[in-house]
Amino acid sequence: MSTTTPGAPTPGAPAPGAPAPFVPIRPKVTFADAVTDTLVITRRNLLRNVRLPQLLLFATVQPVMFLLLFNYVFGGAIGQTIPPVAGGKYINWLMPGLLIQISTFGASQTALGLTEDLQKGVIDRFRSLPMARSAVLAGRTLGDLLRNAGVISLMLVVGFAIGFRYQTSFPEFLAGVGLGLLFAYALSWMMATLGLLVRTPEAAQSAAFLPIFPLVFASSVFLPTQTMPAWLRTFADHQPITVITNALRGLMLGQGALLPGQTVAGQVLVSLAWITGITVVFSVLAVRTYRRAVS
Amino acid sequence: MRTTPADAVVSVSDVVMSFGAVRALDGVSLEVEPGIVYGLLGPNGAGKTTLIRVLATLLRPSAGRAEVAGIDVLADPEAARARIGLAGQFAAVDEYLTGRENVEMVGRLYGLGRRDARTRAADILERIGLAEAAGRQVKTYSGGMRRRLDLAASLVGRPQVMFLDEPTTGIDPRSRMDVWEMVEDLVADGTTVLLTTQYLEEADRLAARIGVIDHGRIISEGTADELKNTFGGDVLELAVDEADRDAAVAVLRRLTGEDPALDRTGTSMRVPARDGAQTLVEAVLALNDASIAPRDIALHRPTLDDVFLALTGEPATSPPAADADAVDEGDAGEGDAGGAGHATSASAGTDRSTR
C-alpha cells in the first residue's frame, strides 16, 4: 500500500506495494550547502538571544552596569593616575578596556550554548542530518560574533552619552572596534573547545570564568599595569588581553596611551598575531573535540 | 518471511561497541526489510540506543558492519544521513523557536529550499494536529506535543529510513496513541521504521518484526505472534504454602503438560496457560479437588519480564543474578523442550549460562 505524497518522487511503475525509489534531497553536501547551513544555524542561535529574556538581560544590562559602575565609582580616584592622553577623563581610558572585558565575558556564552545543545540532544539531531559538519560550530561562533557586535554597539552608545570621546580619527576608532570584535571571535573558538570538553552548562559556566577572571583583571583593562608588583606586571604586560587592550587604546586615544617603546602599529600587529594564533589553534581543537564529544 | 541482505533496508552484522571494559553491543546482527516497522525490544542498558546511534552515524562501532539503504554507514556516513531520520529519546526541539520554525529549520538542514521547507512544515504540522500551535514557542508545549514535533521535524526530510529511540517513553497515554498513529502513517507512506521500546505492547501494536535485545545481543527475533507463542501467551501464577508445593506442582503439570517454573522463594510458580481463563478455572477446580488452598492465584498476559524470564532466566530489570540460578532455570527450560515453542527459550537460556 503506497500512498503517494505530493512532491515525492514518482518515477517508473514499481511493483504494487513497493515504495517509490527514494531520491535524497541532498545526496552530497556542497560548499554552498555549508554556507546555507551556517546561516540557518546562526539565525537559530541569534533568535535564542532575542527570545530568552534572561539572555537579553545578561547581554545588555550587565555590560552597561559595568560601564556605569566602573566609571562613577572608581573614575574619580583613578582619573588622577591615568596617562594625560585620556584628557583626565577615566571614561576615555576605561572604554577600550571594557569593550575587551565584555567581549571576553561574552565569549563564555559560546561554551554555554554548545553544552546546552549537547545536553538536549540537539547536536545529535544535527549530526544525523545531511548538513555540513562545520556549520554547527561556524554558526555558533558567527552568531556569537554578531551578538557581541550588538552588545558593543549598545555600550558605545551609553559610553558616548556619558562622555566618552575617542582622541584620534573615526577610522582609527572603527579599526579599534573591529579589532575588539575579531578578538571576541577568536575567544569564541577557545570557549567552544572548552564547552565541548566539559559538556554540561554548569561545568562550562565555572570552567569558562576560571581563565577569564585572572586574564581580565591582571591586565591593563581597568588600570595601567605600572603599579602592580613586578612578577604580576611581567605577566600582565605580555598576556593577550593587555596587548589587545593596548592596541585598542592606541587606536582610540593615540600613542600617548602606550608604554614607552610601544607603537600603535606594533601593538595592532601583535594583537593580530594573537588573534590568528588563538583562532587557528582553537578552531582545530574545537572541530576535533566536536567529532569526539558526541560519540 | 525472511529477507536476504540484498533487499534489506537496514542490515547490521556482528556490530560490537565497547566503551572501555563495557560491551554495549556484543555482536549484533539484524536485517530489516523495506516498508515495515522493526521493533527493538529490550530493557534499559540493553544496547538499543547504542545501536540506533551507530545506524544514525553518531557512533563508530568498534567492529562489525552496518548498512542503511544499501549504504555502508561507516564508509559513507554523509550519503547515509541523506536517507535517514532520527528522533532520539529526548525531544531535541528548540524551546524558544515556534513549532513551525523548528520544523522549517530541520527541513532547511535536510537541504530543502526556503519555500519547500515552509510548505512541507505546514503540511506536516497540519497532519499531526499541531497546526494551531505552530506559531507558538515550543516552551508552551506539553511533553507529548514536543515529542510529536520532534518526530515531525525528522519527517520533513521524508527519510527513507526512520530511527525512533523510545518514541513514547515518558509521555501520556493520549500522546502515545498519537505517536503510534504517526508511525503507522509513516509506514503507509513507504518509510521503513526501526524503533526501540521497553514496552511489549508497543512492539506488539506497531512492529511487523521484533528483535529482543539484552546485554548487547539479539537474543530472539520474530513476529509478535511468534514471540508470544514462544513465550506461552497467558501465564498462570500460583502461590501456595510450602507444604503444598510438590502437590501443586504435580497438579499443574498434569493439567498443562508442562513443568511449572518455581521462583526463588520456592512457593510461587508460573506455568503457561494455553487456554487463558479456561486454564485458570480448571486449575482452581483441580487444586480444590487436591485440597490445596492457594495463597494467591492469577492469570496474566505476558510482559516484557516474562519474555526475558523465558529467554534468559533473569527478570528484565534486575542485575545479572548469580550464575547458579541462571543454570537452574536454564535446566528447567530444558525440561520444557518437549512442549511446543519452548525450544527457543531453552537454547537461549543455556547459551546464556554457559557463556
Image (tube, rainbow, N blue to C red):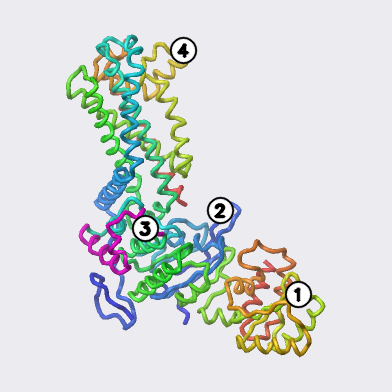
Badge number at residue B19: 2
Where the N terminus of chain A falls, by quadrant?
bottom left
Q: Is A88 situated above or below B190?
A: above
Instruction: Specify whether residue B117 is painted magenta.
Output: yes
Callout 4 secondary element:
loop
**Residue at horizontal 41%, vertical 41%?**
A112
Three-letter amino acid code of the residue under disc 4: Pro
Badge number at residue B127: none
| Extent of the magenta region | B114-142
Would residue B104 be seen by someone viewing this image from the given angle?
no
Location of residue B16 by image quarter: bottom right
In this view, the mark in front (2 or 4): 4
Location of residue A66 by image quarter: top left
**Residue at horizontal 31%, vertical 64%?**
B130
Instruction: Specify whether residue B48 is painted magenta.
Output: no
Q: Distance between the residues labelled 4 and 3?
A: 57 Å
Would residue A263 be seen by someone viewing this image from the given angle?
yes
Task: Identify the residue position indicated by label 1 in the image.
Answer: B267
Q: In this view, does A254 lie to the left or right of B32?
A: left
In this view, the mark in front (1 or 4): 1
Q: How far apart are marks 2 and 4 (CA)?
A: 50 Å
x, y percent for residue B24: 56, 59
Q: How far apart are marks 1 and 3 (CA)?
A: 50 Å
Q: How far apart are marks 1 and 2 (CA)?
A: 41 Å
Task: Identify the residue position indicated by label 3 in the image.
Answer: B141
* Label whose residue precedes the other's in the sequence (1 or 2): 2
Three-letter amino acid code of the residue under disc 1: Thr
